[in-house]
Image (spheres, rainbow, N blue to C red):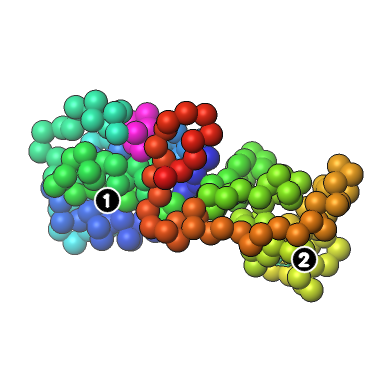
């Protein structure tokens, strides 16, 4: 899922203070699961932003609502309840949701309340860990299902660097070395031979280097255009 963090309050206040009525809009998908942008967080943010101490003049009026998935154009365009008098939307969705809203309600300003951080998974209750950077040419089948792009601090492809020590990465003892994990996972799977196979250099073009990516569904395994 996509993980995001609430922006600093001062940054949000600075972006909304010129408006008279702001719709604080939560998103009911990934950011609800990672407890940063769902309906409950939208209500908490409304409460905090309503405090007069944040403003030199009159604070905006706030209304709270939520859309199931702000990144889905159909769900966004089906949303017809923008309250009368709203002159800006404060979105708690990821960057994709914010932009989908912006296109759907253009020219109404859509302000982002979150910093979208990574594609991750819940490691433990309340902790999310980065797992994938959407590189478009996945190597998990050769690396024991552990991503070297997102989980190795240097994004290495040919084994560990000299900073790998007792299974930890040189960036910190609490950060596992991805290449140590890859090695031991492949060893447990009797697949260490995968590390000795010569592969063509990774194709980074599907990773966004070729411009904005778009997926057109044609059939099974149709890929990205
Ligand atoms: S190799 Fe690429 S697509 Fe696969 S998990 Fe890593 S970043 Fe994601
Ligand atoms: S110690 Fe391991 S995870 Fe850290 S940068 Fe080196 S190879 Fe990558």
Mark 1: is the Cβ under 8 angstroms from ligand 1? no
Q: As rendered, which of 216 and 32 lies closer to the eye? A: 216
**Residue shown at 30%/47% (left/top)?**
99
**Crowding at mark 2 (Cα within 10 Å: few <14, some 14-19, many 20+):** many
Position in image of residue 215 (x %, y %): 41, 40
Q: Which mark is residue 111?
A: 1
Of the numbered discs 2 and 1, the one sitting upstream in the chain is 1
As drawn, 145 above or below 178: above
Question: Element type at marker 1?
Answer: strand
Question: Horizontally, is 128 left or right of 48 in the view?
Answer: right
Mark 2: is the Cβ under 8 angstroms from ligand 2? yes
Q: Which mark is residue 36?
A: none
Position in image of residue 74 (x %, y %): 29, 28
Q: As rendered, which of 183 and 11 lies closer to the eye? A: 183
Kindly tell me whether residue 37 is visible in this rendering. Answer: no
Q: As rendered, which of 159 and 56 lies closer to the eye? A: 159
**Residue shown at 86%/63% (left/top)?**
166
**Residue shown at 57%/50% (left/top)?**
137
Position in image of residue 211 (x %, y %): 38, 57
Kindly tell me whether residue 58 is visible in this rendering. Answer: yes
**Pointer 2 with pointer 1, Cβ within 8 A:** no
Identify the image quadrant of residue 69. Answer: top left
Label 2, on which residue? 160
Q: CA distance from mark 2 to mark 1?
A: 41 Å
Residue 25 magenta-highlighted: no
Quadrant assignment for the C terminus: top left
Position in image of residue 13 (x %, y %): 28, 56
- Which residues are the magenta region? 65-72
Identify the image quadrant of residue 21. Answer: top left
Q: Main secondary structure of the magenta part?
A: loop
As drawn, 106 above or below 75: below
**Crowding at mark 1 (Cα within 10 Å: few <14, some 14-19, many 20+):** many
């Amino acid at each position: 899922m996509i993980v995001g963090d609430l922006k600093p309050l001062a940054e949000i206040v600075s972006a909304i203070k010129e408006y008279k009525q702001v719709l604080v809009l939560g998103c009911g998908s990934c950011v609800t699961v990672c407890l940063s942008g769902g309906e409950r967080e939208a209500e908490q943010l409304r409460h905090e932003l309503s405090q007069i101490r944040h403003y030199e003049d009159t604070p905006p009026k706030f209304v709270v609502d939520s859309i199931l998935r702000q990144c889905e154009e159909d769900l966004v365009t089906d949303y017809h309840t923008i309250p009368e008098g709203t002159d800006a939307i404060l979105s708690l969705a990821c960057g994709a949701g914010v932009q989908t809203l912006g296109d759907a309600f253009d020219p109404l300003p859509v302000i982002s309340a979150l910093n979208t951080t990574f594609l991750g998974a819940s490691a433990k209750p309340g902790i999310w860990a980065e797992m994938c950077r959407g590189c478009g040419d996945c190597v998990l089948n050769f690396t024991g299902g552990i991503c070297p792009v997102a989980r190795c601090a240097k994004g290495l492809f040919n084994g560990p660097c000299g900073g790998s020590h007792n299974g930890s990465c040189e960036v910190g003892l609490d950060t596992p070395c991805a290449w140590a994990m890859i090695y031991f996972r492949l060893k447990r799977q009797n697949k260490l031979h995968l590390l000795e196979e010569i592969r063509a250099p990774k194709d980074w073009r599907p990773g966004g280097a070729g411009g904005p990516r778009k997926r057109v569904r044609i059939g099974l395994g149709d890929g990205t255009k």
